[in-house]
Image (spheres, rainbow, N blue to C red):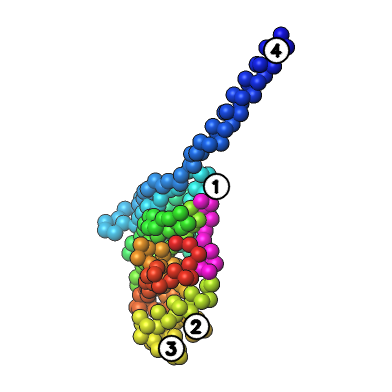
Amino acid sequence: MKHYTLLLFATLLLAGCKKDKEENNEPKEVQQLTFTAQHYSKKTSLPCKDNCPKVTIDVPIAEGPEVASDSINKKVFDVVRKIIFFGEQPYAANNYDDLMASFIKSYEELKNEYPREALGWEGDVNAFIAYRSDKVLNINLEHYTYTGGAHGYAGKRSLLFNPETGKSLTYSDIFKDEASFTDFAEKQFREKFKIPMGKSINTTGLMFENDKFILPQNIFFTDEGLLLYYNPYEIASYAEQEKELLLPYNEIEQYLKVK
């Protein structure tokens, strides 16, 4: 009886070891981050003929690893929330439907107060995955808003993420030495826009703060290289529109931590 007990114990032990070995050797399936395009839209309920006030929002919704997808979705929504609003502060909305409803409500309240005024509001956001690698996820966000006045405002935003964690990438995450890259970018910027070294960076009518070259608020990763993009009003008047500079990867490889 003792012999059979020992034999049974040995058999179970070997089976357990084999199972552990197989589990350790088998590649574990990693849940991938995926995106689904989502469309939102809303129009005013007030009577109108042409150019009826409306909001249109197209965004990629991240799905997959919860921490990463939640981080990305929250960041994208927060940026959209700071674009689609009227007044001094963004709306306290928690989702896209509430955000659009708040925007349309602001229009309708103003229209009811000034019924004779021709108010043709518009809010449009189009966000999409423009670049993706193992280290970088770049969501481009193109937007246009009009809430009265001489003209609306169009711009672009670059949202950069670590695709594994969903955390936003800062310039210190992207560049090995931000100061050295900035010096290189300034030389290329001056060459493109014909601003001699040694002369004021604002000599041609630009409006860099403190007359000092700085990197733009938005940098885009593209297949060709890194795009430095200055939105209207960032370094120039609205009439000057946006300014951009494309730096090929083979010229900036030494400055990059990720690509």
Q: Which residue is mark 1?
A: 67
Q: Is residue 171 magenta?
A: yes
Asked whether the residues under the numbered discs 2 and 4 touch, taking CB atoms below 8 Å apart as contact, a structural biologist would say no
Percent x, y for residue 208? 47, 81
Q: Which residue is mark 3?
A: 197
Percent x, y for residue 108? 40, 56
Q: Label 2 neighbourhood size at 10 Å, few (<14), some (14-19), many (20+)?
A: few
Percent x, y for residue 24? 56, 36
Q: Label 3 neighbourhood size at 10 Å, few (<14), some (14-19), many (20+)?
A: few
Q: Nearer the viewer, residue 3 or 33?
A: 3
103 on left or right of 176: left
Say whether residue 39 is visible: yes
Q: Which mark is residue 153?
A: none
3D distance between C-alphas at marks 1 and 2: 39 Å
3D distance between C-alphas at marks 2 and 3: 12 Å
3D distance between C-alphas at marks 3 and 1: 46 Å
Mark 1 or mark 4: name the one nearer the start of the chain: 4
Magenta segment's dominant SS is loop
